[in-house]
Image (spheres, helix red, strand yellow):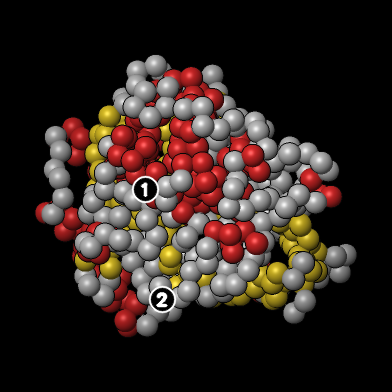
């Protein structure tokens, strides 16, 4: 078991106390709905199931993952069924999470940005298939030989098929100098990322690029001659009823008591409580699950021809049409015979979140946490899908765990390296643990003498043993890690 300071332990007890008391400060629902909430709270599960598993409850999983606060909202039959907060929005202030607490939506911002850009296309203010430089006036994308004379289009920016660099952004500490969009796109100080440039030729595949989405932010500003946050508030958020949400960076709202404080994976707070993201379209949205559910509901209604408050059914269907693989306009889609899911996740410094909706069933959910550890979101999502009987969603992998003696486990202890990335294994009691990132350790489970898995990562893992029985490395999804110590 990981050792904690007395301060950290006191934080956990405070979080658990707040979970137990949350019903006294938040909306109460009908007995039938309260029963569904209780079932969701007590049926968490991850991607794998073993012969030793029982379902988990939210309280114990928050403690396990060092999650300070989580907010959940569920859409059922096209309406918000319930919304509830758990734990603490800010530990030092002893401020609980409520259904109104605002979290950084991180990359979920890209979904709402997709709506905004599609709105401009719908209003014939831009062509989704035109060269982006046709609309950029305050900065131009510098084509080079990598793009092979193929134009980068607006649609490609939204669907990550433009072949551009910069996966994500770290944000800026509060009080730091903020870069302009032009400085960010050119990688000039005080920007804290490199320039956004071609990585592959456009259309060669899906290359996730927050940098490309940031270019779309500048296109919105150049086309409308408005600040990005003002355009999005007036044309997307407010018409959807997301009146508690905003893209303004840094937050201009005077009521800071609604803003959650972000925490690292070990439970320590982010310096300054949260980072600032001038890359608003890629990572700048502040919102809560109830507001995001309004976006999910509007998408469902519009897709089915029942609303056009922002986008017409035609443009909503276009937004959900993959350009390549599962990547559509600011959203990822998964279409099966009985379901059509659209979703996106997000991870900023101190925040992780996830949403999914189904335009066929009218169901959806949003999970937002103020932690770098994103494991809880998938476990809650699996519980919601199970309790509400979602089709084609939660299909856990079944594995049989075997016991390995302490003597045999000890041979796997050590340091492993691949492409400059180091992974450590250690013994703690009778268990073998692995550290996927510094100061965070998780249990290793064996299904054979060499095959193993960890609950926090869905992947094929296997130790490599030579003819003399010496462990020389391990493989992860085909990548070989060599034992170096």
* Residue highlighted by disc 2: 175
Q: Which one is closest to the eye, mark 2 or mark 1?
A: 1
Instruction: Please name the residue shown 31% across and 48% down the image.
Output: 245
Q: Quadrant of residue 289?
A: top left
Q: Position of residue 69 (x, y in %)?
A: 32, 60
229 or 277: nearer the viewer: 229
User: Circle 1 — which element?
Assistant: helix
* Residue lying at the far right of the rendered structure: 467
Picture quadrant where residue 324 is located? top right
Q: Nearer the viewer, residue 155 or 140?
A: 140
Q: Residue furthest top?
A: 305
Measure how far apart labels 2 and 1 are at the Cα level: 23 Å
Relative to residue 484, is residue 286 drawn left or right? Answer: left
- Residue 219 horizontal/vertical position (percent): 55, 45
Foreground residue, 232 or 105?
232
Residue 385 placed where, x, y %? 40, 35
| One can see residue 135 in this view | yes
Q: Nearer the viewer, residue 67 or 135?
A: 135
Q: Position of residue 344 (x, y in %)?
A: 49, 43
Numbered mark located on residue 400 in the image: none
Compared to residue 439, the image places residue 22 above or below, namely above
Please tell me whether mark 2 sits on a helix, a strand or a loop: loop
Residue at numbered disc 1: 230
- Give the quarter of the figure containing the C terminus: bottom right
> Left or right: 169 with respect to 294?
right
Quick one: label 2 or label 1, which is nearer the N terminus? 2
User: Residue shown at 21%/70% (left/top)?
Assistant: 94
Q: Residues within 10 Å of mark 1 (few under 14, many from 20)?
A: some
Q: Going 52% across and 46% down the picture, which residue do you hit?
A: 222
């Amino acid at each position: 078991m990981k050792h904690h300071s007395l301060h950290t332990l006191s934080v956990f007890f405070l979080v658990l106390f707040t979970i137990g008391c949350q019903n006294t400060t938040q909306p109460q629902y009908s007995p039938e709905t309260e029963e569904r909430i209780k079932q969701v709270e007590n049926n968490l599960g991850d991607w794998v199931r073993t012969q030793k598993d029982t379902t988990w409850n939210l309280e114990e999983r928050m403690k396990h993952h060092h999650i300070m606060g989580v907010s959940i909202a569920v859409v059922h039959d096209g309406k918000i069924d319930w919304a509830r907060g758990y734990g603490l929005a800010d530990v030092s202030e002893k401020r609980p999470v409520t259904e109104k607490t605002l979290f950084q939506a991180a990359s979920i911002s890209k979904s709402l940005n997709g709506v905004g850009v599609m709105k401009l296309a719908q209003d014939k203010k831009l062509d989704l298939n035109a060269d982006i430089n046709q609309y950029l006036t305050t900065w131009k994308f510098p084509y080079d030989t990598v793009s092979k004379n193929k134009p980068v289009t607006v649609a490609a920016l939204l669907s990550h098929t433009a072949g551009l660099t910069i996966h994500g952004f770290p944000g800026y500490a509060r009080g730091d100098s903020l870069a302009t969009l032009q400085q960010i796109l050119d990688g000039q100080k005080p920007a804290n990322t490199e320039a956004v440039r071609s990585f592959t030729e456009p259309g060669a595949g899906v290359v996730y690029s927050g940098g490309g989405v940031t270019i779309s932010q500048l296109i919105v500003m150049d086309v409308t001659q408005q600040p990005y946050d003002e355009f999005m508030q007036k044309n997307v958020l407010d018409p959807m009823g997301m009146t508690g949400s905003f893209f303004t960076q840094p937050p201009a709202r005077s009521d800071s008591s609604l803003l959650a404080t972000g925490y690292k994976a070990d439970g320590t707070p982010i310096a300054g409580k949260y980072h600032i993201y001038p890359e608003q379209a890629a990572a700048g949205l502040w919102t809560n699950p109830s507001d995001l559910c309004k976006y999910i509901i509007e998408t469902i209604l519009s897709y089915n021809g029942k609303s056009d408050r922002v986008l017409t059914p035609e443009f909503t269907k276009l937004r959900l049409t993959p350009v390549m693989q599962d990547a559509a306009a600011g959203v990822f889609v998964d279409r099966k015979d009985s379901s059509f899911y659209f979703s996106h996740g997000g991870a900023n410094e101190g925040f992780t979140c996830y949403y999914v909706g189904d335009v066929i069933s009218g169901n959806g959910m949003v999970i937002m946490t103020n932690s770098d550890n994103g494991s809880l979101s998938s476990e809650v999502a699996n519980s919601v899908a199970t309790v509400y009987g979602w089709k084609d969603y939660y299909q856990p992998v079944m594995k049989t765990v075997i016991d390995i003696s302490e003597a045999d486990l000890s041979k796997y202890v050590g340091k492993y390296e691949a492409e400059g990335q180091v992974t450590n294994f250690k013994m703690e009691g009778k268990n073998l643990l692995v550290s996927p990132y510094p100061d965070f350790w998780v249990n290793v489970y064996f299904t054979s003498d060499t095959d193993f898995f960890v609950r926090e990562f869905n992947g094929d893992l296997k130790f490599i043993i030579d003819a003399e029985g010496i462990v020389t490395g391990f493989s992860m999804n085909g990548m070989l890690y060599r034992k170096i110590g």
